[in-house]
Image: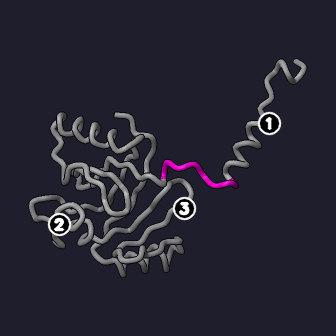
Amino acid sequence: MRPRFIGAMGLITSSLAKGRALYVDALGLPLRQAEGAGFLHSTRLGGGRYFGVWPLSEAARTCFRTDRWPTDRPVPQMFIEFEMANPAAVSAAASEFESKGYTPLHRPRTDPWGQTVARFQTEDGVIVGISYVPWMHRPAGPKAKRARASRRARRVPLARAGR
């Protein structure tokens, strides 16, 4: 298993309105609600690719296909997703997790928005995702390409620099 980076992390809240009041209204985070979804998120915060505030009812729906979190499981307070190289790597990593005794909340699947993910839960209640999100692996736009080209141009080998 070789995660590439932390693809997503966020908090799970019992009330989206209270989450919005704290993280958007009080802290001023640039979180927005996805069309047709019941959670807040941003891909514009430094230090990460995605941050979200996920209602517990939606986490339950995503993991168990019901609006209520099962009473026999710890109530999660946060989620973190480790980004893999491709969908096949998600399946391999999920199998490896299972072989080490971790029971999945759900096995690998591809969601309508294109994310392939398997989720597990720690004894503390944290939801851990093994994930592949296509847009996180696409080359950046023209501005990022220009910045990379500029950095490469500044790297002059010592022999060519006259040393």
Question: What secondary structure is found at the residue carrying circle 3?
Answer: loop
Q: Disc 3 to disc 1, how far (Cα)?
A: 28 Å
The local crowd at label 2, few if under 14, some if 14 to 19, many if 20 or more residues have their Cα within 10 Å, is: few
Q: Quadrant of the C terminus?
A: top right
CB under 8 Å between discs 2 and 1: no
Magenta span of residues: 136-143
Residue 4 drawn at (x, y percent): 44, 40
Instruction: Identify which residue is drawn at 74% across, 36% down.
Output: 152
Q: Which residue is denoted by mark 1 in the rendering?
A: 154
Label whose residue precedes the other's in the sequence (2 or 1): 2
Figure check: 36 above or below 6: below
Left or right for 140, reference 23:
right
Left or right for 88, reference 43:
left
The residue type indicated by label 3 comes to: Leu
Residue 33 lies in quadrant: bottom left
Residue 118 drawn at (x, y percent): 26, 50
Question: What secondary structure is found at the residue carrying circle 2?
Answer: loop
Residue 65, disc: 2
The residue type indicated by label 2 comes to: Arg
Q: Disc 2 to disc 3, how far (Cα)?
A: 30 Å
Q: Which residue is denoted by mark 3 in the rendering?
A: 45
Q: Residue furthest left?
A: 72
Q: Disc 2 to disc 1, how far (Cα)?
A: 53 Å
